[in-house]
Image (cartoon, coloured by chain):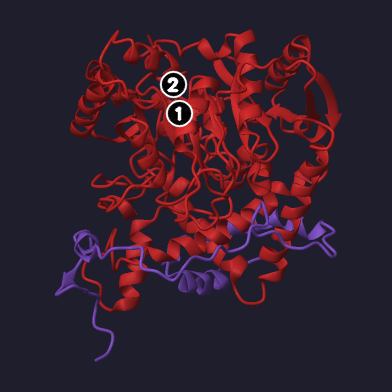
Amino acid sequence: MHQQTIAQLVQGLQSKAFSSVELTRHYLERIKRLDGTYNSYITVTEERALAQAAEADKRLAQADAPALCGVPIAHKDIFCTHGVRTSCGSKMLDNFIAPYNATIVENLQAAGAVMLGKTNMDEFAMGSSNETSYYGPVKNPWATDSVPGGSSGGSAASVAAHLAAGATASDTGGSIRQPAALCGLTGLKPTYGRVSRWGMIAFASSLDQAGTLTRTAEDSALMLNAMASFDPKDSTCVDQPLEDYRAQLDQSVKGLTIGIPDEYFGEGLNPETAAAVEAAIKTYESLGATIKRISLPHSNLAVAAYYVIAPAECSANLSRFDGARYGYRCENPKDLHDLYERSRSEGFGEEVKRRILVGTYALSAGYYDAYYNKAQQVRRLIKQDFVQAFEEVDVILGPTSPSPAFAFGAKTQDPVSMYLEDIFTIPTNLAGLPGVSIPCGLVGGKPVGMQLIGNYFAEGQLLNVAHQFQVATDFHQQAAPGIE
Amino acid sequence: MAIAPSDIAKLAHLARIAVPESEVDQVTQRISDVLDLVDQLQAADTEGVQPMAHPLDATQRLRADQVTETNQRDEFQAIAPATEDGLYLVPRVIE
């Protein structure tokens, strides 16, 4: 059962080939048996999962079952889940039992999905390797000496090891797409504002967006159908008509123009990764798409702009963790300042503290114009590059990540080298565009991903282009060695 | 823009994060590395470019001035480190 995609599980559940309780028990048993190796879950919600599954079976017996009725999924531990610990991968929130559900958690519950548990992640979603988690690193199911990527490393590993049919995730600078690439999955980051951020613990509010990690583009469409909504509780959510993201999947890519940005194939890109992406371009050509070289001239400034904007917004967002109302509080504070300072110093890990300090510096008196304002101006230049490109092409294609999964510890001593992991994914967040990473090959036995970038609210088209590649190839069907 | 170890103490105070004496040099070095990276921005020509706050240039939505939230004080205080009579407890501020 665990080898099936969400689309296949929906079929199986609706045709009564198996029940949701059977399916959920099967996944829970696999998690118990195998997750000791991967560490992809922080919390497994067995009781709740079985109760939701029993409820789903009742609805399946009647004829009003919603789209994902009975399908077991996992939530990244950044999404608030009522009555369940929501840690965000941090000691700061190790004792935080969320008093409400995130909107996407509500939406998926309404669609009948069963929650298996909460997945591991880099602390407060800050990292590209899942090594900053308070709950320990997650191992990549393809090579257990290597990182799964981050920050949604637990969500990616749980799906790649078949410990969940699909998982929610969040992407601020590549945190869905880079783990998707490193774990051989399909990872979708929707347009900024397409999916509600309400109940998603904030890192950088102008960049954060919730999305999905699944085995196929079709599964991403099914999950996005359930997740996307206009939510008045998220002031940056965009009131745009919803569509059926599955509707366009079967369209041909004949006549479609795919843009290949020169800047995404330069220095720093592993030659074998480049070769796998070049081969994928050839596949699209053979399917009838037109390939066009394009330029996104401000791409080289994206990482610099991001490492001003993201830390600045992080320093403001994380000021709420003060030891007073919820979360970690230090022992025996001697006064209020001591309470704040020690609770934060003891509750946050090294990378989070570093970003808070960088952000505090960028926003401090006298530096605002030189840093934050300048970065926001560069951000517009980056967006304009994309707007111009989309006058000539339908989608943009390039590598997701410069190289395949790296070994634990390889980049932890040099934060800047870790930041460059997201060199190809960050521009999309700055511009607010949707992006999807899909598998396109193996290098040294590890997966390589390519990234497709679409125009604003073109998730339907983006998933169509990804799906057509998956109809023509079988990279997405390969499982990690040892995963039966 | 270079940052000195003395700047770290000021930043740490602003951010309410303690940086132990033994870690000041390493923290200074790593934050300097990040600032070297972001200094690439200074080379960009941004003359007359409007800063971008929201990718779709959305503006703040307004809503009717009506009560939409119910009182959930008990549930919120159940997860607080210390409360008394519906109040959050912190160390004494005024002697």
**Which residue is disc 1 drawn over?**
A156
Identify the subunit bearing mark 2: A
CB under 8 Å between discs 1 and 2: yes
**Which residue is disc 2 drawn over?**
A160
Number of disc labels: 2
* Residue A445: quadrant of the picture: top right
* Residue A426: quadrant of the picture: top right
Residue placed at 60% from the left, 27% from the top?
A: A437
Left or right of A160: which side holds A328?
A: left
Q: Position of residue A84 (x, y in %)?
A: 25, 44
Identify the subunit bearing mark 1: A
Q: Position of residue A285 (x, y in %)?
A: 78, 13
Residue placed at 67% from the left, 52% from the top?
A: B56
Which amino acid does the dot numbered 1 rest on? Ala
Residue placed at 67% from the left, 17% from the top?
A: A251
Q: Which mark is residue A329?
A: none
The secondary element bearing badge 1 is classed as helix
In this view, the residue farthest toward the front is A63
On screen, residue A319 above or below A338: above
The alpha-carbon separation of the residues under discs 1 and 2 comes to 6 Å
Colour in which chain A is drawn: red
Q: Are marks 1 and 2 on the same chain?
A: yes
On screen, residue A155 above or below B90: above
- Say whether residue A441 is visible: no
- Judging by colour alone, the chain drawn in purple in this rendered image is B
